[in-house]
Image: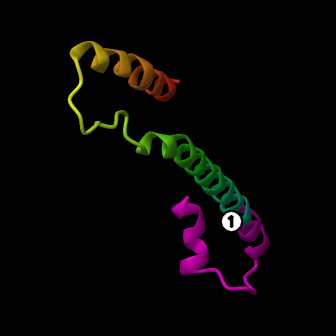
Amino acid sequence: MLDALQPGIDTLKWNSENINPFINKAMKIVTEVDELVKKMKDNVRKMNEITKNWAKPLYERKNKALLAEDVEQTHQAVVQPRLEEIRN
């Protein structure tokens, strides 16, 4: 890409004989890059929306001691669905 734009940096002037083909080629390249950057920004925005829910803790510890069975039930009821949501 840079090679295609280099004549505009080094040698071409606005009144140069071959300026129109250069401008058309440069415009095509810039348009393609602009579309790519917009798509990348859109993808990042979507990833941020998806991962925003992952920021909350998987499990909140209670102040009182629990029996092993209660911990297992809580884990099954809370953590497993969250992990499945993240996998999806």
Camera-side residue of 20 and 57: 57
- Left or right side of 24 for 41: left
- Identify residue for label 1: 26
- Left or right side of 67 for 45: right
Amino acid type of the residue that numbered disc 1 sits on in the rendered structure: Ala
Residue drawn at 64 percent across, 80 percent down: 12
Camera-side residue of 48 and 85: 85
Give the x, y percent position of residue 39: 64, 49
In the figure, residue 23 lies in which quadrant?
Answer: bottom right
Residue drawn at 42 percent across, 45 percent down: 55
How many numbered marks have been drawn onto this rendered protein structure?
Answer: 1
Give the x, y percent position of residue 17: 76, 79
Residue drawn at 73 percent across, 59 percent down: 28
Q: Which residues are magenta?
A: 1-25
Give the x, y percent position of residue 47: 54, 44
Give the x, y percent position of residue 43: 59, 46
User: What is the magenta segment's predominant secondary structure?
Assistant: helix
For residue 15, above or below residue 87: below
Q: Say which element carries label 1.
A: helix
Q: Is residue 6 magenta?
A: yes
